[in-house]
Amino acid sequence: MDFWKIYRNSQKLFLYERSTGKVSFNMQLIPADSYRFINSILKVNIDLMEIIAEGWQKISSKFSIYPVHLAGIWSNKYLMFENRENIAVAQTPEKLEILHRQIRSMPITELILLDYVEAAGVISMETGEYDIKGDLNEEEIRLINSIVHAFDDLSVLITDMLLYTSGLAWDRNEGWFLAGDGHVLISVLGKWCFMDAGKFEDVLLDRG
């Protein structure tokens, strides 16, 4: 999944290049204190996501998300995405909002029938109950539930930090994703699926 292709195609607001330390803003679209914003956004670290994805790879050979080529969090207004070299914020693509509504509203018995969805699940943060469809054994189900729980909480924490420390009107967090070679793990907070990486790239590019 090509970071720069997605960045060039997006309505971009912010870019930080780790190798050079260069920061680019579209200040007409971000009414934020730039110093606080930079310091907040740099707390998002792909290293943790890479460790989790590698752990999944060691336990399961299914639905590979390792190495992580792209990771992101989005709201109904903004998409924040990163790879090892760069972090960017853009306006949320319309097709990502459409996909979000589809995953949120569609029963997993129907979601799993889509040709680009490999596995799907609903988990309860309160009771620990779950319903999962797809080729996953009990150990894989236990692990994917732990991953989704952890990143659901982390993504909400990160976006709360962005809201309160930068002034960026993030509004509400809608979900997150980890994209590897062939698959993407995408969560809409309490409901998740593994889907084809090529299909998800089309969503981020607002096409197809």
Image: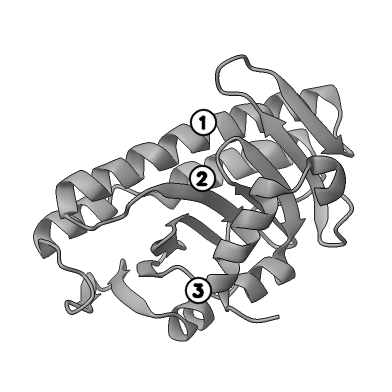
Q: Is residue 140 above or below residue 127?
A: below
Numbered marks: total: 3
* Res 3 label: 3
Residue at the outermost bottom position: 8
Residue drawn 66% across the image and 75% down it: 202
Q: Measure the alpha-carbon separation of dots 1 and 3.
A: 25 Å
Q: Amino acid at mark 1?
A: Ala
Mark nearer the N terminus (1 vs 3): 3
- Work out whether residue 151 can be spotted: yes
Q: Which residue is mark 2?
A: 49
- Where does the image place residue 135, in percent across and percent down from the top left? 89, 39
Which of the pair 110/143 is nearer the observer?
A: 110
Q: Name the quadrant containing residue 133.
A: top right
Q: Amino acid at mark 3?
A: Phe
Mark 3: give few (<14), some (14-19) or many (20+) Cα within 10 Å: some
Q: Which residue is mark 1?
A: 150
| Between marks 1 and 2 in the image, the one whose residue lies nearer the viewer | 1
Mark nearer the N terminus (3 vs 2): 3
93 on left or right of 171: right
Residue drawn 50% across the image and 74% down it: 3
Q: Amino acid at mark 2?
A: Met
Residue at the outermost front position: 105
Q: Measure the alpha-carbon separation of dots 1 and 2.
A: 11 Å
